[in-house]
Every structure is written in structure tokens, then in C-alpha cells.
Amino acid sequence: MKTLEWEDNKLKLIDQRKLPDELSYVYCDNYQDVIVAIKNMTVRGAPAIGVSAAFGMALADIEGVDLDKAADEIKSARPTAVNLFWAVDRVLDSDDALAEALKMYEEDMATNRAIGKYGAEVIDDGDTILTHCNAGALACVDYGTALGVIRAARDAGKNINVICDETRPRGQGASLSVWEMQQENIPVKLIPDVASGFLMSQGKIDKVVIGADRIARGGVVNKVGSFMVALAAKHHDIPFYVAAPYSTFDNEISIYDTIIEERDGDEVRYYGGARICPEGTEVINPAFDITPKELITGIITEKGIIDPI
Ligand SMILES: CSC[C@H]1O[C@H](OP(=O)(O)O)[C@H](O)[C@@H]1O
């Protein structure tokens, strides 16, 4: 089961907003549908956004839409994950939009398995691994980056346990990562975001492995809350790894120049459809944060484990 597939000249997406209770699909048959799906997080996760955007360009090409125009519109869908921009530009520079998108589709899966292979080498038998948000198959075409490391460690015969924090406000850890681990029969527990530091202090977490949306000079941008987890891990001398492909690296900027997406305040005002604060409460809702390189043990890439840049 792939997060996204090209089927009958349409982009077929798992509707991640419906998980974990319902496995259903959204079909995009034009590039504007892809923009909507990225914006409303039908599809989310840096690599999945990138490959979806590439297929969006292929749909624009099939429709005969000017690709520069389509590129600008697709790039406006979400501002932080560098994969979106890299993927659109790669299709723009290609001779065949659909062929390039299909190449990226295959590359993503191969890349994630390579990340998993290297990552499994730092996972020990018996480890309990904390992960934040969803950097799994659902954040990619398949297999995942951080959860790919977990899958590879399990396949290497290591007995591991996973702890997912819920990852407020959108709850990707609770709704997506827990679901993925249960599909794989990998032992998993869910915790409130605010409990991870305490569990570390109790010696209940051996390693942290998370994904990334942009890696640049000075650190890593990832789902909001990653920085807090990294601080707690540093305090407890717990290894903190970021699993990401080279396509998530942005060598042009300082990480502090990254545009951090601000999302709708209702994502915070409501939980499970119920309002949890007084009507009209003002909200600050950054979707990502910045983890400084000093807090990162290593970056697990498809070419090996490297120091943060
Ligand atoms: C494999 S990178 C996934 C990355 O994307 C997530 O953000 P979002 O769910 O808002 O697209 C989160 O930062 C994950 O680590």
C-alpha cells in the first residue's frame, strides 16, 4: 500500500485526514487538486509532498498548462518542506514531466530503504525508540525515513519498542505513526507530547529518531515540538537522530532563514472536533521548529550517517 500512486493519469492519495479509522483515497486529476491536497494535508510529509508536487506538474503538463505558471502555484501550497521546491524545479528542468515524477517515485522508496539500512546500525537490540510526528511511509511514497529506520532495525532481528508522542495540534504521531507501527506488529505506545521528558528521566527511552522538512546550516527544521524533544534528550544524554534524504538538505541558507509555516488557529482551538478554549481565543500555531545542530547526534541519510551541517 503506497501513500501515493499514479493510476489512470490521476494521482491517487491516501487521505491521511481520515486515518486511523478510515483508509480512503483522494484522486487528483488536475494540478489544482494536488495543491488543495497538499494545503489541507490530505498528503503531508516532506518527501510525499515533493513527489506529489512532481505528479502535480505532470498533470499540468498533460492539461497543457504553462509549467512555469503551474510551478509557481504548486510551490505556494506550503512554505517549509524543501522537497516541494526541489521536486517542482527538477520536473521543470526535465524533458518529460511524467517520466521525471515516476523516477522520483521509485527513487524515494530506494532512498528510504538505504536510510533504514544505515539507521538500523545505530539501533540496539532491546531499544525503546521515541519518534515525533510521522516520518513514516505516510510521509513518503513508502517505507518512511525515521520509521524506515525502525522497520529496518526490526527486519535486522532487533527487538525494539516504539513510543510515539501524539504530536499536537494535528496529531500525526497518534493518528499516523501509531497506525503504521500497528500495521507492522511493531510494539508501540502512545504518549502525550508533554510526557517525553519525564519518560527520558525514568530511563524509558533509549534513542530518538525523527524526520526533517529542511536541513540547512545550523540545524534541522521539523514538526513543532522536535526542538523540545531534542532539549530533553540532550539533558539525559539520549542519542537524537534525524533521518532524512539528501533531497531535504538546503545548502544555500542558514536554518534560521527557513520560512516556518503558520497554520490556522482552529487546529489548536479544536481537538477531536470539540473546541477546547474560549470562543475566539487568539492562537500562535507554528507548524515547525528549529533544532540547533548542537542537539543532534547524527543525520541518517541514504549515503550514511553524517554530522549536522
Ligand atoms: C519524512 S519527513 C516528515 C515530516 O513532515 C511532517 O510535517 P507535516 O506532517 O506538517 O507535513 C513532520 O515534520 C515530519 O517529520
Image (cartoon, rainbow, N blue to C red):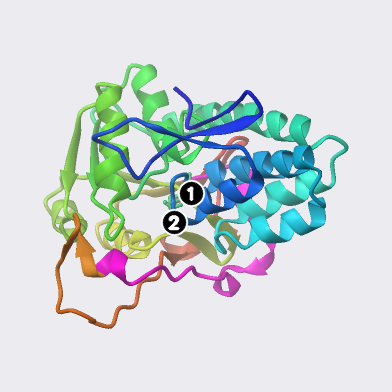
Depth order, front residue of 159/67: 67
The residue indicated by pointer 1 is: 298
The quadrant the N terminus occupies is top left
Q: Helix, strand or loop at disc 1?
A: strand
**Which residue is depicted at the point 55% across and 52% down?**
307
User: Disc 1 marks which amino acid?
Assistant: Gly
Work out whether residue 250 can be spotted.
no
**Which residue is depicted at the point 30% across and 64% down?**
267
List the single residue furthest toward the left: 202
Depth order, front residue of 205/70: 70
Residue span colored magenta: 243-268
Depth order, front residue of 289/25: 25
The residue indicated by pointer 2 is: 296
| Vertical position of residue 216 compared to residue 8: above or below | below
**Which residue is depicted at the point 23% across and 35% down?**
21
Work out whether residue 116 can be spotted.
yes
Q: Residue 59: image x %, image y %?
A: 70, 39
| Left or right: residue 180 compared with residue 193 | right
